[in-house]
Image (cartoon, helix red, strand yellow):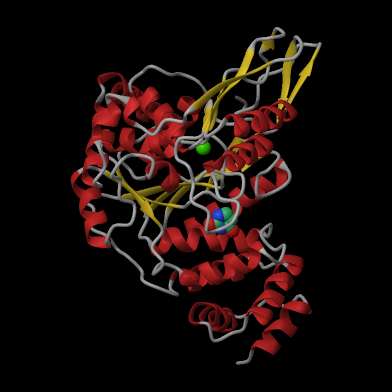
Amino acid sequence: MDIISILEDKKQRRALSKEQIAYFVKGAADGSLPAYQLSALLMAIRLNGMDARETADLTMAMAASGNMLSPDVGGVPVDKHSTGGVGDTTTLVLAPLVAACGGKVLKMSGRGLGHTGGTIDKLESIPGMQVELPEEEFVSIVRSVGCAVVGQSARLAPADKTLYALRDVTATVDSIPLIVSSILSKKFAAGAKAIVLDVKTGSGALMPTLEASVELAKAMVDIGHHAGKSIVAVVSGMEEPLGSHVGNALEVKEAIDILTGRAEGPLKRVSLFLGSLMLTASGVMKTEEGALVLLNRALESGAGLQKLKEMIAAQGGDPRVCDDVSLLPKAPVIYPVQAKAEGYLSHVNGTALGLAAQRMGAGRVSKEDIIDPAVGFVMEKRMGDFVKAGDTVCTLHAASMESAKETEQRVLDALTFTKEPAPKARLLYALVKPEGIIPLNE
Ligand code: URA
Ligand code: CA
């Protein structure tokens, strides 16, 4: 076996054998293949594709490139994965609610990437919270509390670490076989038996069109199903931020507000929908309708909030933030961004808002940057809302007045107002199951 013949085969659009795939995945994981040959292969795969069998072989080889966990969590381990959103804090809402309903949520999350936020960065804004836990401890928390959220261990799917870093800088992120294998290999290695995927569509999403997003969702569900997993995918919109809060501590606050019943809206709706799929995928409930009733009950009784407290305490954090959100980091400058003229908010550029938050210090611009947990903003208006001149459209939580002024312009540039009434943003487009695609219109 040699890498040049593998490159030649993919260049000529020939399907790679399972052995060829295992060879280059091993070379990516152990560093025996150089970046230039792996990069050439990634581009050949991006341009010439892989069939379903090759994609499945690639996923399994990447999953097996490091440790494979088969955790005993006292039930079916269920994970949820979003392909990246802005103001998307579904994990912090649904993990405790699903746990309160008897699910076993074993969640490995990432840090912020580009304009999108990362659950691990959000959790670290809670004083004392540990997100790097030894495997046994993490599994033991899932067993006793019902949920734990930690960072991706470097020992799981190490081939993806190498390949993902190369894709990021070789314009080969937007490839269905490469995305499917990257996401699912990490879920398989972490031992998830039930998987709910939230595939985003819209500007700033991994795939450029609704059709391509549905195709990506279908490819992941097919590969997961054939690997014996209970798996479903939701295709959801990501034009405007899902929640109203963008920024690490602010998003934790919003999740707590929802769990206490103080806040409503699309973040709550999508979290409950994904949560209902987690309960059915893991076999805790038979129907999504029944699961929704149970989740709403856990929300109203405060059982979900109690689970979040237990999880935070188990991971070394200060659970009092759940009763008193003022214990979360606070920014020194609170600054209202006002509308310049009246009109309907017809479009929100979520990517631009995500980048604005990143620039304020909520995300990293280079890998070494240290994020500021307190900064970000709260959107006071949603798509379709009517605003008068002088209305506050967004409240900034900034590190300085200079940062606030700079962000004010970025936020205004991300919003489009029209004279004519404008529709609300679409939230849900499709539910993809192994047996077929169900259109959603919400
Ligand atoms: N997230 C991943 O982990 N991998 C991808 O390829 C894309 C998004
Ligand atoms: Ca989501």
Q: Quadrant of residue 7?
A: bottom right
Q: Quadrant of residue 15?
A: bottom right
Between 249 and 313, the one nearer to me in the picture: 249
Q: Quadrant of the N terminus?
A: bottom right
Q: Quadrant of the C terminus?
A: top right
Examine the rendered structure and indicate whether residue 434 appears above or below residue 57: above
> Residue extending furthest bottom?
1
Displayed-image quarter of ligand 1: bottom right
Q: Quadrant of residue 358?
A: top right
Q: Residue at x 52, y 59 (%)?
A: 368
> Residue extending furthest right?
419
- Residue 376 is situated, as x and y percent measured from the top left of the image, at 53, 33
Q: Residue at x 45, y 68 (%)?
A: 157
Examine the rendered structure and indicate whether residue 92 appears above or below residue 228: above
Q: Is residue 286 left or right of residue 114?
A: left
Q: Is residue 65 left or right of residue 200?
A: left
Between 118 and 201, the one nearer to me in the picture: 118
- Residue 171 is situated, as x and y percent measured from the top left of the image, at 72, 62
Q: Residue at x 59, y 29 (%)?
A: 401
> Residue extending furthest top?
388
Examine the rendered structure and indicate whether residue 302 appears above or below residue 31: above
- Residue 71 is situated, as x and y percent measured from the top left of the image, at 27, 60
**Does any portion of residue 146 appear in the rendered image?**
yes
Examine the rendered structure and indicate whether residue 37 appears above or below residue 206: below
Between 360 and 121, the one nearer to me in the picture: 360
Between 367 and 57, the one nearer to me in the picture: 367
**Does any portion of residue 74 appear in the rendered image?**
no
Count of numbered labels shown in the rendering: 0
- Residue 296 is situated, as x and y percent measured from the top left of the image, at 35, 22
Q: Residue at x 34, y 52 (%)?
A: 131
